[in-house]
Amino acid sequence: MRFVKLTLAALAAVLGMAAVSAPAFAADGGDISRSYGVWRNPKNSVHLEIKDCGASTCGVVVWASAKAEADARKSGTDTLVGKQLLRDFEAQSNGSLKGRVWVPTLKVTLVGSADIVDSRTMRAKGCVLGNFLCKSQLWTRLEGPSVLASRAAP
């Protein structure tokens, strides 16, 4: 029972960081760049900018709540802002994105996937063991050209 609780806690942590990477690929016939922009997790504790990172797509933290920052520091990460949590995300044949997700609080990199629900919503999914013990979350796109500028202000 304790293993299941720890596994589910780890999965929740993965989704807390990873769910952000669900691009608008399926909704736009393959235009992965429509996923680019700033997305917030369900608790609004982490905002990620999804962008082009060379040959793949990545997600970089542009804002984190004080609690999220404190949790990261407890695990040995100096700050979340500027850290690349989503790495090497690529379009799959089924319209999903799949890549690697770094979870600073667990000090581990896992596999994650994302699907666009609509232009403002994406569903991120993470599984601990293959397709077993999975959890998904809905992330929301943040709108407006001042989103990134407002994140940079103290």
Image (spheres, rainbow, N blue to C red):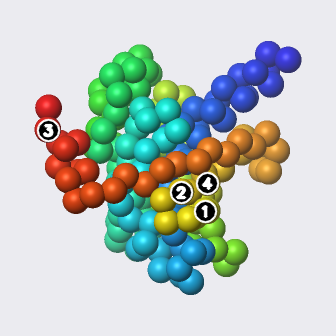
Task: Give yes or no for contact between labels 4 and 3 (Cβ–Cβ under 8 Å).
Answer: no
Tag 1 residue: 117
Q: CA distance from mark 4 to mark 2?
A: 7 Å
Label pair 1/2, CB-CB below 8 angstroms: yes
Residue 64 % position (x, y): 34, 33
Amino acid at circle 3:
Ala
Is 142 left or right of 2, judged from the image as shown? left
Label 1: element kind: strand
In the figure, 100 relative to 89: above or below? above
Q: Is residue 55 visible?
A: yes
| Residue 99 image position (x, y, % from top left) | 56, 59
Task: State the image quarter where residue 80 is shown.
Answer: top left
Number of other residues with Cα within 10 Å of mark 1, as a class: few under 14, some 14 to 19, many 20 or more: some
Give the numbered dot on residue 123.
Answer: 4
Q: Earlier in the sequence, mark 1 or mark 4?
A: 1
Where 54 falls versus 125 (above or below)?
Answer: below
Disc 3 + disc 2, Cβ < 8 Å? no
